[in-house]
Image: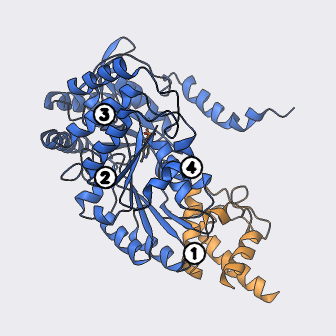
Chain colours: A blue, B orange
Amino acid sequence: MTDLFSKFDALIAQREGLLSTGVMDPFSLVMEEVKSPTVAVVNGKETILLGTYNYMGMTFDDDVIAAGKKALDEFGAGTTGSRVLNGTFQGHKECEDALKEFYDMKYAMVFSTGYQANLGIISTIAGKGDYIILDIDSHASIYDGCKMGDAEIVAFRHNDVEALEKRLKRLPADAGKLVVLEGVYSMLGDVAPLKEMIRVSKEAGAMILVDEAHSMGFIGENGRGVAEEQGVLDDVDFVIGTFSKSVGTVGGFCVSNHPKFEIMRLVCRPYVFTASLPPAVVACSATSIRKLMHGGNKRAHLWENSKTLHKGLRDLGFQLGTPEAQSAIIAVIMPDLGQGAMMWQALLENGLYVNLARPPATPAGMTLLRCSLCAEHTAEQVADILDRFERAGKAVGII
Amino acid sequence: MTERSDMFDRLKGLIEPFNKKGVAVTDSTTFAGDLEWDSLTVMDFVAEVEDSFDIVITMNMQAEIENVGQLVDAVTKLTD
Ligand SMILES: Cc1ncc(COP(=O)(O)O)c(C=O)c1O
């Protein structure tokens, strides 16, 4: 018998090698208690959270929690069904209405996760003979959406407008084309030049999908994302987003002005063949989305946090993923996986949780300590964070 | 036949700057196995080939190309 698991041997060996150096397993951490959007208890120790996607700190918002409790009481624990059968409750509609208002778009479709939103929309709208043109550093859910569909896939160098334009021009003029971009790329926290990219895509007659997972609620005047910030949201055909970041719950969505958009509900398999979100989740989400519309002050504080952390880390001598703070993600580049894991553990022992990211999730084979800020981090916490980075960095010998 | 060897020579020329180990390049040389290219190198090389011939090699096609001979045939077809 061929052991089907033998293909994982190299990864198993790498993991065992890493753990044998005495570092903790960074991928099996447990939050024993969660005290607030910015503090949890890990290994019995109170820890500042700097590696969540809770950008706007909505997870413990009083109104959000109250809405969830009410829905749990009134609509029960789950829906036990697909959105297209028995799984669309009042709350799902309210959530879609909140999204339409938030983005000022005509149509909104709520999925069970953002992963499924990308999987479903991309694999469904680009079919045989069509082309999907995507940034090489796209999120796994975008790649998986491409794999699930029948379109031809063309990748271009990360954030390279010229590379995109050249490839678009080489494709058959009359073929269907979907350009897939992200507002903020989550590994390095860098922002895409959407304005130029959308211009060259439109010139080539392509439709445009932008995943704004990491910018919703934070970037743009109304928190609609990078496309809003760069004044090109009207030219985007489909915005994909998630509730698992700024919204603070779980779920995914697509908003659009395409006049035929509603047909997606019947033809998009990751929408049809899975259960809908529980009532409490959609109630929390709708409430959170509505509150994010008025989050101007929180957004300003989050920008301050992000800029302060970026400058502080740079001044300490760390190598960062972007020359300046472009989003709420600040990526600290580690020399290699071994030192990255040591640094990660040293930070945790100092009461600070960040995300350890490594290939294949990261670009260019990098090991990263990804810091993501929250609007609820106080200025004192940010100072504290820098302090802990300094101590850990010196102990490990990275600075 | 000379056309094919012309194409082979052109592609071999594009491979060389990425051929860090100085592997002898023949039709049966594989990119992942013999040249030991990682995904990043593959991306840079594909972009180089695409720009040189003004073509697009889709990821669907790339998945089928494992060795130099297959690349020669694929690029020949794309430039026809
Ligand atoms: C760019 C991007 N798109 C989509 C997703 C998927 O979102 P979700 O967590 O809702 O599945 C994520 C988050 O993991 C992401 O970073």
Q: Is residue A322 above or below residue A6?
A: below
Quarter the N terminus of chain A occupies: top right
Q: Which residue is mark 4?
A: A144
A170 sits left or right of A254 in the view:
right
- Report the chain holding disc 4: A
Tag on residue A54? 3
* Residue closer to the observer: A295 or A27: A295
Q: Is residue A68 above or below residue A355?
A: above
Asked if both marks, 4 and 3, belong to the same chain, the answer given is yes
- Report the chain holding disc 1: B
Q: Nearer the viewer, mark 1 or mark 4?
A: 4
Helix, strand or loop at disc 3? Answer: loop
Q: Quadrant of ligand 1?
A: top left
Q: Nearer the viewer, mark 3 or mark 2?
A: 3
Per the model, the C-alpha gap separating discs 3 and 2 is 21 Å
Tag on residue A322? 2
Per the model, the C-alpha gap separating discs 1 and 2 is 29 Å
For label 3, being within 8 Å of ligand 1 is answered no
Q: Nearer the viewer, mark 4 or mark 2?
A: 4
Q: Which residue is mark 1?
A: B50
* Residue closer to the observer: B47 or A389: B47
Per the model, the C-alpha gap separating discs 4 and 2 is 27 Å
Asked if both marks, 1 and 2, belong to the same chain, the answer given is no
- Report the chain holding disc 2: A
Give neighbour class at mark 2: few <14, some 14-19, many 20+ (Cα, 10 Å): some
